[in-house]
Image: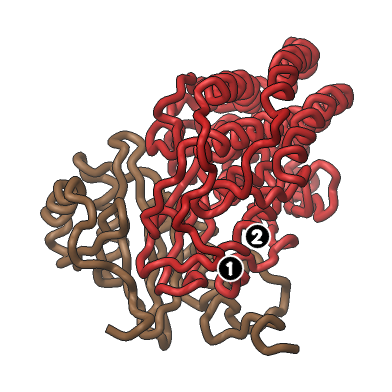
Chain colours: A brown, B red
Amino acid sequence: MTEHAAPTPSAPVDPKLELMANLLKDIFAPFEPEMGYAIDEVSLTISPKDIVAACKLAKENEELKFDYLRCLSVVDYEEHFQVVYHLYSMKKHHKMVLKVNLPKDNPRVSSVVSVWKGADWHEREGAELFGVTFEEHPNLAPLLLYEGFEGYPMLKSYPLGPYEDGS
Amino acid sequence: MKMEAEKRFDTVDMMLNMGPQHPSTHGVFRMVLTIDGEKIVAVEPHIGYLHRGTEKLCEGEYYLQIVSLFDRLDYISSFNNELAFVIAVEKLMGIQVPERAEYIRVIMCELNRIASHLMFYAAFGADAGAITPFLYAFREREQIQSVFEAVSGARMMHNYFRVGGVIEDLPPDFGDRMNKLIPKLKQGIQECDDLLTGNEIFIARAKGVGAISAADAIDFGMSGPNLRACGVLEDIRRSEPYSVYPTLDFDIPAGQNGDCWDRYMVRMEEMRQSLRIVEQAIAEMPQGPVIAPQVRKIVKVPKGEVYVRVENPRGDFGVYLISQGGDKPYRVKIRGASFCNLMTLKKLLQQCYVADCVVVLGSLDIVLGEVDR
């Protein structure tokens, strides 16, 4: 593992998590997930091509019912991009994390707006600040930056400004 | 002949631009309305006028410095934002916060919630055409702001919470101040309630306007008082408790119809509940240290990731913190409550009248600092 790889320990930090982990492992078995743990929740890394199917399953499965998208983030790791879906269930009061890794050149993943409408602006933000293309998004227009801004400012390769280059 | 008559009465949808500096947009926010007569057909919100790249800035600052950046997100409820970030760092470091510090944090956050809801009350009254509530609410809010100043040294942008506790203990006269403040606030909130809540014009402007169903609200990621107004009893202080909230007794008010009126009523009741929390917290607050002893000046966080959310006055405020070790974070993703609440505007404004759009926007209680980040 290189220095800036994704920090996901392979063993559960809290033994209580194991129950949730086993449940998720069973339900998501067709997607062959890679299990990970983040302090108090379970994370599953799956293949980008399965993301919409996996999200639909997470939302509709009777035991899971993940009806609420807490957050959708893009992270620029040294070797790949990672799109992270933090899910929560208002009915069952439990949570999980879904992750997909995208290649550095031409990062593309299907949009999940069809599953949760709340993904809309998060994905637009990810596209604008990181250059990740969310396919089949209804309107992937720029959201936050001013018109005519060039480049993807949240990339690690984009300079932070006067703090670092001393200008 | 008939064709021609139809052609003559053909209507064309009109584009109406609002903002970016319209006084009712609560900051620099622009929306483009497509209207058919008086009805809104579609709305396209434009945000980003206050984008400062806070997430990028966080990557270049020490953990201690980032707290001050979080003050500037939702500047009406700075304490609550600070709390989310310091909890995230503490979870990664495995720090146990001294009990007194937890109580101080809760008192500050709940006072902040009251101040924030008073701001909502002020602005919402003005949005609906009533100016006097603004003056009443600011009179009350000012008293809370002076307590904040006495405690943290700043009326806004407090920078008071630290990883592991708070920067210093409460001032010696804090108890006396609160003993005077709480009855005054109770009376003040009641006066605000009496002034606006029963007003016939206000009821007509708010009731049944801009309603959303619970299922839609959850789908859009709505949270906080706006979601509870739809009848969903979801409060992170209860469902994913943090700090000392599990030991405190309070009710979660909820509405039924998810309209502007319910969103207003939920917040009015929440102020009273927050006062209850403050009273209990002051009574139960123990003596002792206010910051964990193992916290150094330069905070170094071990490798790992955590997602923390707190119940901000505006709803679910989340921080996704990734550390690769060292004194600066690798990535900080901020999930603003207002950001997600504002997304529902498209749905809320459909089939609304143009005259109502200001009321609906006001009822969401957004802060653009948190939307644009």
> Which corner quadrant of the image does residue B121 belong to?
top right
Under circle 2, the secondary element is helix
Mark 1 vs mark 2: which is more N-terminal? 1
- Answer few, some or many: residues within 10 Å of disc 1's Cα (few below 14, many 20 plus, some between 14 and 19): many
From the viewer's perspective, is residue A125 above or below residue B8? below
Q: Residue at x 30, y 51 (%)?
A: A40
User: Which of B330/B248 is in front?
Assistant: B248
Q: Is residue A89 above or below residue B157?
A: above
Q: State the separation of the CA atoms marked 1 and 2.
A: 8 Å
Disc 2 crowd, CA 10 A, few/some/many (<14, 14-19, 20+): many
Mark 1, residue position: B58
Q: Count the numbered circles shown.
A: 2
Residue B195 horizontal/vertical position (percent): 80, 13
Q: Amino acid at mark 2?
A: Leu
- Front-most of B353 and B19? B19
Q: Chain of mark 1?
A: B
Q: Amino acid at mark 1?
A: Cys
Number of the label disc, if any, that sits on residue B69: 2
What residue sits 40% from the left and 84% below the top? A78
